[in-house]
Amino acid sequence: MRMMESERIRWLLGKRPTLTTKGNVFGEMVTETRFDIVLHNAATVEIERHMILQELEKSPKSVHQLHEITGIPKADIVRQIIALMKWRKVDYAGREGRSPLYCALSEQGEEAE
């Protein structure tokens, strides 16, 4: 449900008719197959992002813990955490041994309880 609330997914779905019939801003036609690939990739990123956020809302976790729970490759988790930190949805929450822990932030920018 959270993924469908994503502005990126809604934008892509809304632009599908234009992109596949009239082309992009450069006048290049986007085939249905290419559009489906782009949409699939965007949906995958959104699903991963929301899976990570959902886990971090429960309690602070490391990249390794997130990988164990979600099955998302560690490199992808790191990329998602960087993006989520940039958008102030995730923050550093300390360390467990040598591993940094991350937590979800509420809408007001405070740690989720």
Image (spheres, rainbow, N blue to C red):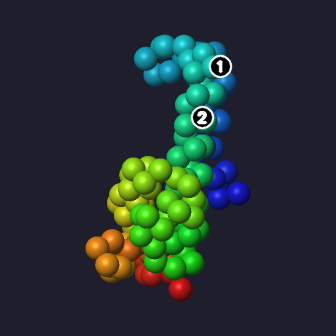
Residue 93 badge: none
In the picture, residue 109 is in which quadrant? bottom left
Counting from the top left corner in percent of width and height, residue 8 is at 55, 44
Looking at this view, name the residue that lies furthest to the left.
Answer: 98
**Secondary element at tag 2:** helix
**Secondary element at tag 1:** helix
Q: Is residue 83 visible?
A: no
The kind of residue tagged 1 is Glu
Looking at this view, name the residue that lies furthest to the right.
Answer: 1
Q: In the rendered image, which residue does mark 1 sit on?
A: 32
Name the one closer to the observer, 20 or 94.
Answer: 94
Counting from the top left corner in percent of width and height, residue 73 is at 47, 50
Residue 39 badge: 2
Counting from the top left corner in percent of width and height, residue 72 is at 52, 53
Crowding near pointer 2: few (<14 within 10 Å), some, many (20+)?
A: some
Task: Name the quadrant of the N terminus.
Answer: bottom right
The kind of residue tagged 2 is Leu
The residue that appears at 63% across and 53% down in the rendered structure is 3
In the picture, residue 57 is in which quadrant? bottom right
Note whether 38 is above or below 61 in the view shown: above
Counting from the top left corner in percent of width and height, residue 62 is at 41, 70
**CA distance separating discs 2 and 1:** 10 Å
Q: Is residue 48 visible?
A: yes
The residue that appears at 60% across and 16% down in the rendered structure is 31
